Image (spheres, rainbow, N blue to C red):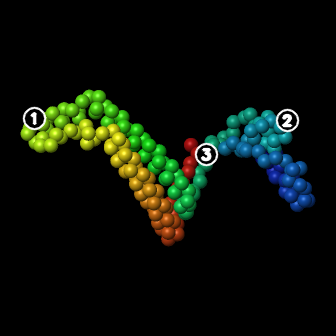
């Protein structure tokens, strides 16, 4: 197995030094953790599975690959785009949820009951009607304005956080992450 790998590497090195065009070189093939190829000889892969000793288990245990990465910079424009779209989606969800809650409260009769309770206590001086104050149009327009302000504030806040992260990561080197292949 190792002989095939060495021969292939030697052949590739010769073709590079001889000026062979890249299209005539042998193709790069992904290998498993064990270093075996994924194809057969008929496909022209440099590490065939059916080569001598490839079917036997070796004494090696495959190890998980680990890679250490650092997130050193965040693009503020991409943060702005993603935050804007997520904020708009959250705003639409918020408007629909408030409309459904208002419809549920109206069907149950909460507005009428609160109006009756206020009028029975004697606090009703000018014909208090909670349903007219909290009409569907008033509630939805208020929630829509609040959602628009929320979208703008969230987007600006996320861009400021991204810019601060870029400045701080230049000082300390960013966030270090180790990824593992389990």
46 above or below 161? above
Residue that numbered label 2 is attached to: 42
46 sits left or right of 81 in the view: right
Crowd class of label 3 (few under 14; some 14 to 19; many from 20; radius 10 Å): few
* Residue 38, quarter of picture: top right
The answer, for residue 8, to whether it is visible in the render is: yes
Q: Residues within 10 Å of mark 2 (few under 14, many from 20)?
A: few
Quadrant, the N terminus: top right
Of discs 2 and 3, which sits in the foreground?
Answer: 2
Determine the residue positioned at 38% across, 50% down.
145
Q: Residue at x 42, y 46 (%)?
A: 91
10 Å neighbourhood of mark 1: few (<14), some, or many (≥20)? Answer: few
Which type of secondary structure does the marked residue at label 2 adopt? helix
Of helix, strand and loop, which one carries label 3? loop
Give me the residue at 50% from left, 69% from top. 167
Badge 1 element: helix
Q: Are marks 2 and 3 in contact (CB under 8 Å)?
A: no
User: Which quadrant of the rendered structure holds the C terminus?
Assistant: top right
In primary-sequence order, the first of circles 2 and 3 is 2
Earlier along the polypeptide chain: callout 3 or callout 1? Answer: 3
Q: Residue at x 24, y 30 (%)?
A: 109
Report the Cα–Cα distance between label 2 and label 1: 91 Å
Please tell me whether mark 3 or mark 1 is closer to you in this view.
1
- Give the labeled residue for mark 3: 63
Marks 2 and 3, Cα distance to the nearest angstrom? 29 Å
Say which label, 2 or 1, has the lower sequence index.
2
Looking at the rendered image, the disc whose residue lies closer to the viewer, 2 or 1, is: 1
Nearest the camera: 83 or 141? 141
Numbered mark located on residue 120 in the image:
1
């Amino acid at each position: 197995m190792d002989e095939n790998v060495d021969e292939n590497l030697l052949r590739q090195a010769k073709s590079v030094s001889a000026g062979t065009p890249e299209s005539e070189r042998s193709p790069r093939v992904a290998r498993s953790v064990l270093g075996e190829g994924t194809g057969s000889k008929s496909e022209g892969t440099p590490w065939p599975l059916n080569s001598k000793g490839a079917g036997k288990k070796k004494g090696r245990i495959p190890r998980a690959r680990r890679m250490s990465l650092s997130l050193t910079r965040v693009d503020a424009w991409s943060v702005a785009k993603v935050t804007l779209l997520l904020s708009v989606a959250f705003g639409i969800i918020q408007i629909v949820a408030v409309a459904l809650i208002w419809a549920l409260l109206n069907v149950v009769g909460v507005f009428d009951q609160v109006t009756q309770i206020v009028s029975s206590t004697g606090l009703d001086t000018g014909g208090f009607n909670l349903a007219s104050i909290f009409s569907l149009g008033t509630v939805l327009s208020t929630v829509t304005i609040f959602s628009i302000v929320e979208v703008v504030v969230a987007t600006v806040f996320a861009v400021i956080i991204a810019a601060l992260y870029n400045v701080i990561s230049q000082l300390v080197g960013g966030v270090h992450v180790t990824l593992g292949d389990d």
